[in-house]
Image (tube, grey):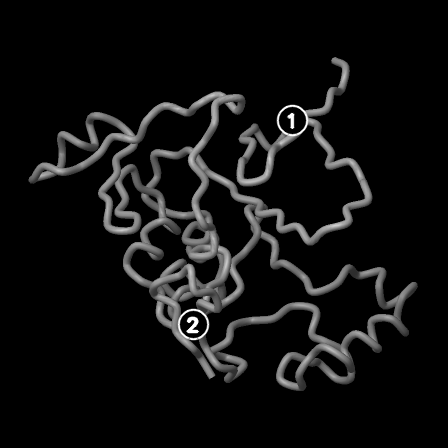
Amino acid sequence: ARMRSIEVPCGHMIVFYQHILHEVPSQLISRDTLRLFVGWRLTTSALSLQDLAARAKDGVPDTDAVIRLQAVPLLPSGQRPPMYAQNHRSFWLADLQAWSDRCVIDQCKAGPLVARHLSSLAELRLPMYRDYTDEEQQVLKPADRWTLQGERLALTPSAVEREEDEGVVQLRPWRPLSEKAQRRQACRYMLRGGYSECDPLARDFS
């Protein structure tokens, strides 16, 4: 099949199956941009991928522990996300050393270099962000019902019917990209710790 370009306007998103061949073309951009990657897993399981990995291997924290310790979760593949690639030591050691000296605090180093894998803010004894709210925790686990910014949502009609009381809104079908979508300030879930005035729950952490 022939590749074609799809422009994603500012404030919009594109959803596709991750195994579809795709690329983000390189281009010169004269302004600051923020690109947020989000993934969904469709499953009937009550366990997250992190929970499954924790059951399969000792020493891997489950989702609750990741939240409590503010740890680094596994990638969907089950791998630990590294701070740098293995070949950086061979080909860019000087740059890696300079970056470690300039940007990395001692608690995150293994010798003179930044540790290739980091554990958690709690284990490293670093300042922690504010506690995750119940709303934030529930979106990190498989579910078909959520409460987001005080609004109760359900993925399917059956999930709505299981609710003991009223006031649950069934999620609407997706809208075409060409239809004008309502834009919302996205700071709430992009800045965990709250540095922006657009986050009403933002707190200083120092």
Q: Which residue lies furthest to the left in this view?
A: 165
In the image, residue 109 sits, relative to residue 151, either above or below, namely below
Question: Mark 1: which secondary structure?
Answer: loop
Residue at left 67%, top 25%? Answer: 6
Residue at left 74%, top 20%? Answer: 4
| 1 and 2 marks in contact (CB < 8 Å) | no
Q: In which quarter of the image is the N terminus?
A: top right
Amino acid type assigned to the residue bearing label 2 in the image: Leu
Tell me the residue that label 2 is attached to: 69
Question: Mark 2: which secondary structure?
Answer: helix
* Alpha carbons under labels 1 and 2: distance apart: 35 Å
Q: Nearer the viewer, residue 36 or 45?
A: 36
Please tell me how crowded label 1 is: few (under 14), some (14-19), or many (20+) other residues with Cα within 10 Å.
few
Please provide percent x and percent y for residue 140: 39, 51
Q: Which of 123 and 182 is in front in this view?
A: 182
Residue at left 26%, top 47%? Answer: 147
Please indicate whether residue 198 sits to the left or right of residue 13 in the image. left
Residue 183 image-quadrant placement: top left
Tell me the residue that label 1 is attached to: 20
Please provide percent x and percent y for residue 172: 32, 27
In the image, residue 12 sits, relative to residue 92, either above or below, namely above
Total numbered labels: 2
Please indicate whether residue 62 sits to the left or right of residue 115 in the image. left
Please provide percent x and percent y for residue 15: 54, 31
Please tell me how crowded label 2 is: few (under 14), some (14-19), or many (20+) other residues with Cα within 10 Å.
some
Among numbered discs 1 and 2, the one appearing first in the sequence: 1
Q: Which residue lies furthest to the top in this view?
A: 1
Which label sits on residue 109?
none
Amino acid type assigned to the residue bearing label 1 in the image: Ile
Please provide percent x and percent y for residue 98: 84, 77
Please indicate whether residue 201 sits to the left or right of residue 4 in the image. left
